[in-house]
Image (cartoon, rainbow, N blue to C red):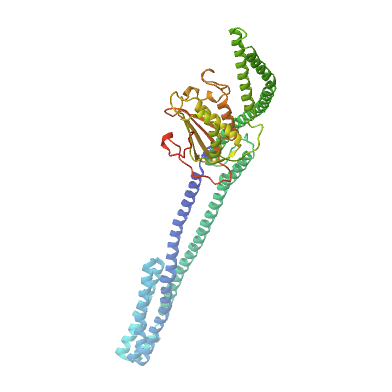
Amino acid sequence: MSVFKLRTWTLRRRVTALVATVAFLLTALGVFAAITAAESNENLDTVLNKTGPMRIAGENLVTALVDQETGIRGYAITGRQDTLRPYDDGLARERRLLTVIEQGEVLFDDSDVRAALLNFRQNADRWRATVAEPVIAAVRAQGPEAGQALVRAASTAQFDAVRTSIERLKSTILKVRNSAADAAEQTGNTQVAIQISAAAIIILAGAALLLLIDRLVTQPVVDLAEQVREVAKGDYDKRIVSAGSPELRTLARDVDGMRTQIAAELTEVREARAQVEWINEQLKTQAEELVRSNRDLEQFAYVASHDLQEPLRKVASFCQLLQRRYAGQLDERADQYIGFAVDGAQRMQRLINDLLAFSRIGRLTAGFTEVDLNKVLGEVKSQLEARAGEDGEIVWHELPVVEGEEPLLTTLFVNLIGNALKFRRPDVPPRVEITAWLEGEEWHVNVRDNGIGIEAEFADKVFVIFQRLHAKDAYEGTGIGLAIVKKIVEYHGGRIWLDLDVDEGTSINFTLPVLAGLPVQEAEPAPETPSSQSPKEVAAP
């Protein structure tokens, strides 16, 4: 497997391969350990449960054989049957011990033990056949003397052969036992080696896993975090890469893609911010120019209207003198020309006075105070009483107390109500209703009449200075009244607009801020129509 192909392995695949290898090695060691343990148990069983009883039986065979010889000699001397008991007991014990040895030999099936056991049987049977049984028969038939003669005549070579065969059997059993003990010790050493190998494999696997995690995860993550911190500090052009596992390399590519996108968007934001700042500077400059221009225009209007007053009064005065002194003395055309001059001078004077009043709004101020609009409406009603006539009505609801300049607010209502009375419908008694209600932090005031109304196309034009919707001979005035109203409302922090959703007449709405620190009156809902309310009316007589 090439190194390049190995580098493409994911961290999960590498860890899985490492765990599988360790598991395979540990399983193999486990199987080998199980086999070795079985062999060790078998060897220990041979030492403890097989050769142990055989060795004891071999040692006891000597005692049994000696008892048999002692019993034969005693019986040959005394001739009594009770002295033969050691022989009988020794023979019975010999047979039991041989049975034990035979069972152990059958368990581990050793040929040397089997041959030594067979040799012992042959020698023991030969000694009994040639020595013990003839002595017993002679004593029983001829008496002790005959038995003693046979004992003296018998050679000890046969009994020595039996002893030798016993020693051979014992040495053979000991050899088997030592061989099993050596095998048990070897299997024990093998088990220790297996355990050491397993521990070594686990330690090496742990070290390999730690090294793998360190090289593929820990160090690359630390390096990736350092790169991200550098980008976070402002180095947006730094490319983010990773030399770790494929997962981290993929993550680094994704983070770098995000960095690239953020850098591109940040560049756009910086460009947009620079453009906005440039536009703001331009707007600031233009605003300053506009403020200066407006100030200069207001100063010019004030100065021009003020300075034009004196020559205009002279022109008007002398025209009126001409009209009074020479009226009827000149021809009819001359009287008409003088009348035109007097009328033009008077209209010019009214225009200049209105322009002067317009320019003074916000320039000459006495400061805001608490103004009761009910009191203001009472004053306005008194001023417009003659214009309203006997059949006219000026009614209002309970109005709030606001913060502002009372003279300007009086002028505001004089212009709005005066327009409503001026633009009445023929043969219809004029009616003007003023209502107010609270919406949020603003008082909404509505002035509605039943006059001729205003077309929707002129909704914005009516608040422009010197804009007239009718011929000057149809309705008196200079066309500056609603412009003054708008400037007064805006000076007080409000806004004004024409309500077009009415069936008849004119409905003008404007707002005034709620008086700071003053308890707010309970707001009334906006009226749908003038007739839908039950107002507190104050009617013109």
The residue furthest left is 141
Which residue is depicted at the point 48% across and 22% down? 457
Total labels: the figure holds 0
Near-viewer residue (310 or 523): 310
Residue 210, horizontal then vertical, whole percent: 56, 50
The relative height of residue 540 versus residue 322 in the rendered view (above or below) is below
Residue 297, horizontal then vertical, whole percent: 66, 24
Q: Is residue 464 visible?
A: yes
The relative height of residue 306 versus residue 407 in the rendered view (above or below) is above
Which residue is depicted at the point 41% across and 74% down? 53
Which residue is depicted at the point 67% across and 20% down? 313
Q: For residue 42, which quarter of the picture?
A: bottom left
The relative height of residue 369 versus residue 460 in the rendered view (above or below) is below
Residue 368, horizontal then vertical, whole percent: 62, 39
Near-viewer residue (213 or 41): 213
Q: For residue 163, which quarter of the picture?
A: bottom left
Near-viewer residue (520 or 450): 450
Compared across the picture, whether 332 is left or right of 61 comes to: right
Compared across the picture, whether 238 is left or right of 184 comes to: right
Near-viewer residue (253 or 493): 493
Q: Is residue 253 visible?
A: no
